[in-house]
Amino acid sequence: MVKSNEIDEGDINAVKAILTAVCAVWNISAKDLVGRSRKQPLAFARQLAMALTYRMTSFSHADVGEVFGGREHATVWHAVSVIETIEEQHKKTSKLIEATLQQIELTN
């Protein structure tokens, strides 16, 4: 686990940008994003946010899980896997993922 005094400020800013962008593009609240609901599309948006956080920061799977309500590292690993598969196989959803990435760039 990354200790609070070891967290890079760039990582903190990236997490904020990811949360803001995912909430904006998927029209959900930050509270819902880190909440426990498994309803779609909320669960997918959460998976996307976890996967992007893992990709765009130096956080481990466990660290990302902590950011998203204390989830297990395996949950984050699964989210990363799901998003990678969707990016490869589903063009429509992949476009929404790209829109989320563009929103993150605007936030930074």
Image (spheres, rainbow, N blue to C red):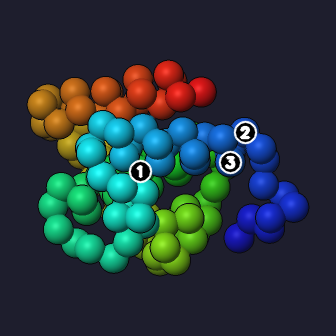
Q: Residue at x 52, y 49 (%)?
A: 53
Q: Is residue 88 above or below residue 52?
A: above
Give yes or no for contact between labels 3 and 2 (Cβ–Cβ under 8 Å): yes
- Secondary element under disc 2, as helix, strand or loop, is helix
Instruction: State the image quarter where residue 26 is shown.
Output: top left
Residue 43 percent coordinates (x, y): 25, 62
Whether residue 68 is visible to the viewer of this picture, yes or no, is: yes
Classify 10 Å Cα crowding around label 3: few (below 14), some (14-19), many (20 and above): few
Q: Farthest residue in the right direction?
A: 5
Question: Residue beneath label 2, please?
Answer: 10
Left or right relative to 108: residue 96: left
Residue 5 percent coordinates (x, y): 87, 61
- Secondary element under disc 1, as helix, strand or loop, is helix
Name the residue type under label 3: Ile
Q: How many marks?
A: 3
Residue in the foreground of this view, choosing between 32 and 3: 32
Classify 10 Å Cα crowding around label 2: few (below 14), some (14-19), many (20 and above): few
Residue in the foreground of this view, choosing between 8 and 90: 8
Q: Residue at x 26, y 74 (%)?
A: 37
Q: Is residue 89 above or below residue 8?
A: above
Name the residue type under label 2: Gly
Q: Residue at x 18, y 55 (%)?
A: 41
Residue 24 percent coordinates (x, y): 35, 39
Whether residue 80 is visible to the viewer of this picture, yes or no, is: no
Numbered circle sitting on residue 12: 3
Question: Residue beneath label 1, please?
Answer: 49
Name the residue type under label 1: Ala
Q: Residue at x 21, y 43 (%)?
A: 86
- Secondary element under disc 3, as helix, strand or loop, is helix
Label 2 or label 1, whichever comes before in sequence order? 2
